[in-house]
Structures are given as C-alpha cells and as structure tokens.
Image (cartoon, grey):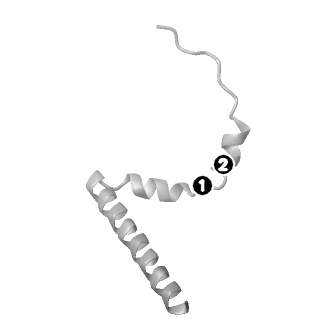
Amino acid sequence: MKQPSERFEPDPVIEAYKRHVDRTLIRENLRLTVEERFDALMRLQQFAEELQRAGREARQRND
C-alpha cells in the first residue's frame, strides 16, 4: 500500500474558523468519560429548559 507523499496545504477557511475555537474546552471534554459527557449534556439541557421556562414566565408577566 502506498503512503501519500504529498502534504496538503491547510484550507484557509478552516484555518479562519479554528482561530475562534477554544481548544482547551475540547481537550477538557475529551478527558471525560462518555458517561460524564452525557451527564454534562443532560445538565446543559436542563439549564436550557429552565431558561426557556423563565423566559415564558417573564413574557407572561409583562403582557
């Protein structure tokens, strides 16, 4: 099987997006077990639902 001998130049669009990505958060998440990641995701979802509920209640009070 042949190994590719040529190197590809980095895509400028991808490089532009990478500048705005906090890789420390990615590394931190990858250190977690799969179960810990699911737990974090569920907590985030619960938080989002609470924010939505609070927003609905605030709009109802202002009407």
Residue 27, quarter of the rendered image:
bottom left
Percent from the top left, x then y, of residue 57?
45, 85
Q: Secondary structure at mark 1?
A: loop
Callout 1: few (<14), some (14-19), or many (20+) C-alpha neighbours within 10 Å?
A: few
Give the residue displayed 49% in from the left and 80% down from the top.
Answer: 55
Q: Secondary structure at mark 2?
A: helix
Is 37 above or below relative to 43? above
In the rendered image, the quadrant that contains the C terminus is bottom right
Report the residue that reaches farthest toward the bottom: 61
Badges 1 and 2: C-beta atoms under 8 Å apart?
A: yes
Residue type beneath disc 1: Val
In the foreground, 31 or 34: 34
Residue type beneath disc 2: Tyr
Give the residue displayed 50% in from the left and 92% down from the top.
Answer: 61
In the foreground, 29 or 50: 50
Per the image, the residue denoted by label 1 is 21
Report the residue that reaches farthest toward the left: 35
Per the image, the residue denoted by label 2 is 17
In the foreground, 27 or 21: 21
Residue 50, quarter of the rendered image:
bottom left
Callout 2: few (<14), some (14-19), or many (20+) C-alpha neighbours within 10 Å?
A: few
Q: CA distance from mark 1 to mark 2?
A: 7 Å
Give the residue displayed 43% in from the left and 70% down from the top.
Answer: 48
Report the residue that reaches farthest toward the right: 12
